[in-house]
Amino acid sequence: MGFNVEQFKGYFKSDFAKSALFEVFFPTFADLRFQVSSAVLPGSTVGTDVFTNGPYRPIERPITRGYSASPFNFILDNEGRCLSALNSMMDSVVDPDGFVGYPVQYESNATITHYNQSGGKVSTYTLHDCFISSISDVNLDWSNGDAVASVACTLSYKSYSMSSFGGSGSVRARFGEADIVDKIEPENKAPKLFYS
């Protein structure tokens, strides 16, 4: 049977998700909400290792989950608020004198909300314990008078969680690590010996 375009389109109940309908919210700098011109919904990878046991075939097993940093592009304003906020965030990580801040001073959450064409939420991603790890140069150019100045930055984060709304006001599903566990304390007892 051949490919049916109408059947394919019918699978998507309302329409396809549009990449331009989003906002990024930093609780520490709420003014930057509408200045993010591009963002990336985060992904993750599962790290694996190969285990061998004598003459048996090696087996690859998952051992960890990793998160890559997220790039963001900001449109600059004429008041300098955006660059001031980004540099302030960067200074709280490592100040110009080289002093590294404590995580409680620079880590915060950032929220990326993706909307549908009607203004309903499709999904919300929360980057947990994130901080700015790089700010790009800002290109200025006399020959391009209509261009809008922008700056790119990278956010590193510990984990993310995602809530799926499906265009409605209520959460349909949740994924990710909202409450990450840094360390699991071992039991305070001697291990069992399996030999006599």
Image: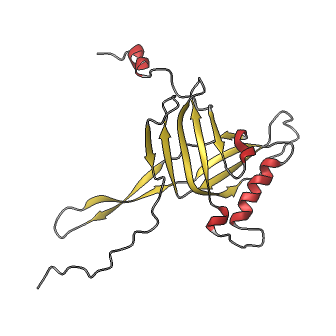
Q: In the image, residue 85 lies at what x, y percent?
A: 76, 53
Colour scheme in the image? secondary structure
Residue furthest left in the image: 196
Above or below — where is 153 with respect to 145?
A: below
Question: Does residue 75 appear to the left or right of 38 in the view shown?
Answer: right
Quadrant hosting residue 58: bottom left
Question: Does residue 148 appear to the left or right of 30 in the view shown?
Answer: right
Residue displayed at 53% across by 31% down? 169
Above or below — where is 6 with respect to 59?
A: above
Above or below — where is 162 with respect to 3?
A: below
Residue displayed at 57% across by 35% down? 114
Quadrant hosting residue 88: bottom right
Residue displayed at 85% across by 43% down? 141
Question: Does residue 102 appear to the left or right of 84 in the view shown?
Answer: left
Q: In the image, residue 12 lies at what x, y percent?
A: 44, 22
Residue furthest right in the image: 142
Quadrant hosting residue 102: bottom right
- Quadrant position of the N terminus in the picture: top left
Residue furthest front in the image: 170
Q: In the image, residue 99 lies at what x, y percent?
A: 72, 73
Q: In the image, residue 143 lies at what x, y percent?
A: 86, 38
Towards the viewer: 107 or 50: 107
- Quadrant position of the C terminus in the picture: bottom left
Question: Does residue 108 appear to the left or right of 12 in the view shown?
Answer: right
- State the count of labels: 0
